[in-house]
Each structure stands twice: as structure tokens, then as C-alpha cells.
Amino acid sequence: MAKLSKKQKAAAELDGEKLYGIEEALKMLRDMASKKFDETVEVAMNLGVDPRHADQMVRGMVSLPAGTGKEMKVAVFAKGDKADEALAAGADKVGAEDLMEDMQAGNLNYDRVIATPDMMGVVGRLGKVLGPKGLMPNPKLGTVTPNVAQAVKDAKGGQVEFRVEKMGIIHSGIGKLSFKDADLKANFKALTDAIVKAKPSGAKGKYVRKVTVTSTMGPGLKVDLAEVEGA
């Protein structure tokens, strides 16, 4: 049996029920982190909702003030001047029917897909391809818009989508362990505030039930709900 490292032993001995302030949690994750790569810091929020019901779905976009530390790949469906604007804003791929065919062929290595309203007839044919990957452009999320340049800049600048999963949990990255504490705290606050504000009309009882912060290789640490506005 392989011997556990000191960091692995420390993680195994953690009190799974202890509640941490966000600063203390970040310090612990850094203390236990691998030095081999820059781990991503992730937040999981357990919510008192059942997303099988439309009036309990939680979904939205939020701009993380310190960015994500990840390079976002963005595809845009647009023609003419709008296509030029998207390219100038930094889109990785811009097209129309040609882009649709490329995606149908399995080229889906994108983090965000944006479309102008007039292109939705083309994009609609990709529902079975983009839908399961959560990439289908949606006007409620600002990814169907005539202002494609701003949508591309937002995506590249640290805007992330959050969406509740089957068990009522939202997972989202908020940056890298190499970020300053102040930046991770600002991103944590932006994300949790946005999720609290997105509380759906059908949510009954306690909305935010548990918040956990972790890193790629680190343990999950429960965050004191006092750190989450409106929890």
C-alpha cells in the first residue's frame, strides 16, 4: 500500500463538519496544494430547489471581477459587419452555415457559443449537438444578441455561466490558487451573490443549504453560510 504524503494525511484528518471562513478555507487549500500545477478553485452550492420543475430552475451569468484564469474559446454565429465585430473583439471562430457544418462534424471545442438573432435559424439545427453540452445560445443569458462584440469581450473577460444540476447543486470555478486572496474572495462574493439573487419563485424553505470550496486536488471545505449574502 502506497504511503500517504503529509498533505494527504492532513486532508484525511480534516473535520468534515467544520465550517470555515472563506479566508481560512483558501489558506488551507494552499497549504495542501500540489506544487506541480496551478490548481483551480471551485465552489459548490447546494440549493433547496428541484430543477425538474421550471419554476425552480437556477441559471444565469456573472462576471467575475478578477477573471477565471482560464482562456475561454468563443465561437460566434454572425455574418457581415457583425462577423467582423466578433473577430475584432477576439472571437476564436466566426461563421454561419460553414460553422454549423463544422460543429455537426464534431468540432465543439468551445467554452461559449454566441449568435446574432438573425442566425438562430441556422443555430437551431444544432440543438441536439449544442444542447447536451450547455452551449446552445440563449437570449436570457445574453448569448443571443446583436451586440456580439460585447458578448465576446464579456466571455473573454471572466464572465461565467452557472446552472443548477439535477441534485440541486451548482458548481463553478472562481479562479486559480495562484490568485491573490482578495481576488478569489471578490470572485467568490460575485458568484454567490448572483446565485442568491437568482432565487427562483418556486424555491421553498431554505434556499442556500451548503457551500463548499475546494481545489482541483484538494479536499472540500464547508464554508460558513454567514459568508454568503442572503443565505
Image (spheres, grey):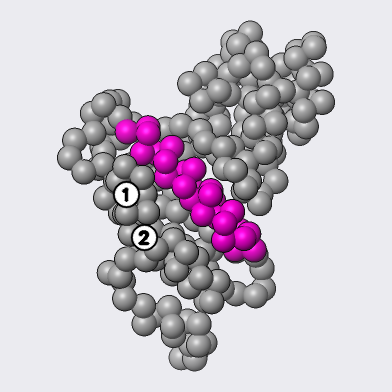
Q: Is residue 54 left or right of residue 181?
A: left
Q: Residue at x 36, y 39 (%)?
A: 196
Which stretch appears magenta? Answer: 172-199
Write down the quadrant of residue 118 in the picture.
Answer: top right
Q: Residues within 10 Å of mark 2 (few under 14, many from 20)?
A: many
Q: In this view, does 185 lie to the left or right of 105?
A: left
Residue 46 marker: 1
> In the picture shown, does residue 82 fall above or below 208?
above
Q: What element carries label 1?
A: strand
> In the picture shown, does residue 35 fall above or below 161?
below
Q: Which of 156 and 102 is in front in this view?
A: 156
Q: Nearer the viewer, residue 84 or 221?
A: 221
Q: Residue at x 44, y 66 (%)?
A: 25
Write down the quadrant of residue 39 in the picture.
Answer: bottom right
Residue 141 marker: none
Q: Nearer the viewer, residue 3 or 60?
A: 60
Whether residue 223 is visible to the viewer of this picture, yes or no, is yes
